[in-house]
Amino acid sequence: MTPEEEAFLAKKKEKQAARRGKPEEKAVLTMTSLMDIISIIVVYLLKTYGSDPVVITPTAGQKIPMSKADSPIQEGVPIYVSQRDITFESKKIVQLDEQGEVDAAAVQNHLIGPLFDALAEEADKSKQMAESRGTEWPGRVIVVGDQGLKFKTLVDVLYTAGRAEFHEYLFCVIQNS
Amino acid sequence: MAKRKKFEEEEIEANLLPVMNIMLLLIPALLLAMEVAQMAAISVSPPKYAAQADQKEEKKQEEPLNLKVFIMEEGYRVSASGQQQGAEAGKSADSSAPTIPLKTPGAPLDDYNRYDYDALEATAKKYKGLFSHETVVTVGAENNIPMQVLVGTMDALRGRDCRLLKAMQGEEVPPECLFWQPIVDAGAG
């Protein structure tokens, strides 16, 4: 709409209002309520995402163990281990069999080959980043396991992470207060 | 002929203020009602044989406890200082029977409450009373043991009233905390 057309319409409305004997009403946008809502949402989102250095998003069907532990999750590399597969950086690395164990072809002496490759690459990257920032590499891995995850599979994952030079392990749990 | 009434269309402006007020109340109410899973972490360590040797040199005066808990399908096997708790006289270990049997024998493996966590916590308290300086426990399990049982076992060994949040911020570890530094060892049994 051109400025001329807009001016014409405004004039027309003014005339219509004058005919009806009403004073011209100017619409005033009250932003207060909207601002209140937005403020609440912003505070909520900041509180939800700002406090956690790592955002844990469990894979479909995964049930994270419940615990009384209250220590916060520290910065680290999350590995998602469900009863069906091992996921790292949103990629399915290894498929688990019906018994919840790593396929025999993918594991040798507790070392899960594809997971080791992915973790070693990540370790190299994060070491370089830490070096460029002048900080110490934490070498921390967060195991986001399933409630029913077998100890054998868990040990394989921990051993593989250790071989990829990660030396601190955290089990991600849901706080059960 | 009836004269048709001239219908004059009136513009009615919707008063949005009450709607906005309700919205304003609804948003915090829904946010509060929403269940948010609070995530936490349990720090575990792999076995460090070299570090243990160093510790021995540092703590020559203090006798090491070497508390080990092995989770079996039939219950817990607890051993300390190389001696299994409840083993037959003259034997260091009696692998045929668990030290702490199941709370609900015959329950399936996916029943995570089949283990006697209370009895394990009581045992941990007993050892903590004898070795107050010890904080480390080695936990192992049979291959089929689910992760939830491992986590529950670590909770019991740490003490279920133990809160480590403040300790992580620099304060002292509270006395309710028993063995809060678990080492996960595949061969702990």
Image (cartoon, coloured by chain):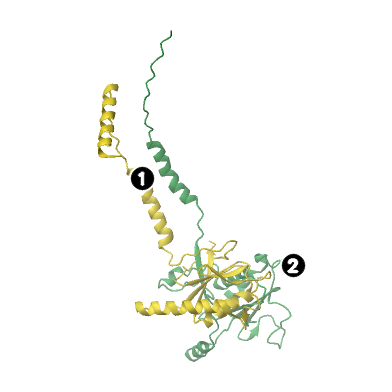
Chain colours: A yellow, B green
- Are marks 1 and 2 in one subunit? no
Q: In this view, does B120 lie above or below A49?
A: below
Q: Is residue B126 shown to the viewer in this render?
A: no
Instruction: Identify the secondary structure beneath mark 2.
Output: loop
Q: Looking at the picture, how far across and down is residue A48, in whole percent?
A: 43, 59
Q: In this view, does B10 lie above or below B160?
A: above
Query: Type of residue at label 2?
Result: Gly
Looking at the image, which is closer to me, A125 or A109? A125
Q: Name the residue under label 2.
A: B106
How many angstroms separate mark 1 from mark 2 (CA)? 59 Å
Q: Residue at position x 25%, y 36% from top?
A: A4
Q: Residue at position x 71%, y 82% from top?
A: B95
Q: Is residue A101 shown to the viewer in this render?
A: yes
Looking at the image, which is closer to me, B49 or B75? B49
Q: Looking at the picture, how far across and down is residue A114, in whole percent?
A: 56, 77
Q: Looking at the picture, how far across and down is residue B72, in whole percent?
A: 68, 75
Q: Mark 1 points at which residue?
A: A34
Q: Residue at position x 65%, y 65% from top?
A: B113
Which chain is mark 1 on?
A
Which chain is mark 2 on?
B
Q: Looking at the picture, how far across and down is residue B173, in whole percent?
A: 46, 73
Kindly indicate the quadrant of the structure image that contains residue A9. Answer: top left
Instruction: Identify the secondary structure beneath mark 1.
Output: helix
The tally of labels here is: 2
Query: Type of residue at label 1?
Result: Leu
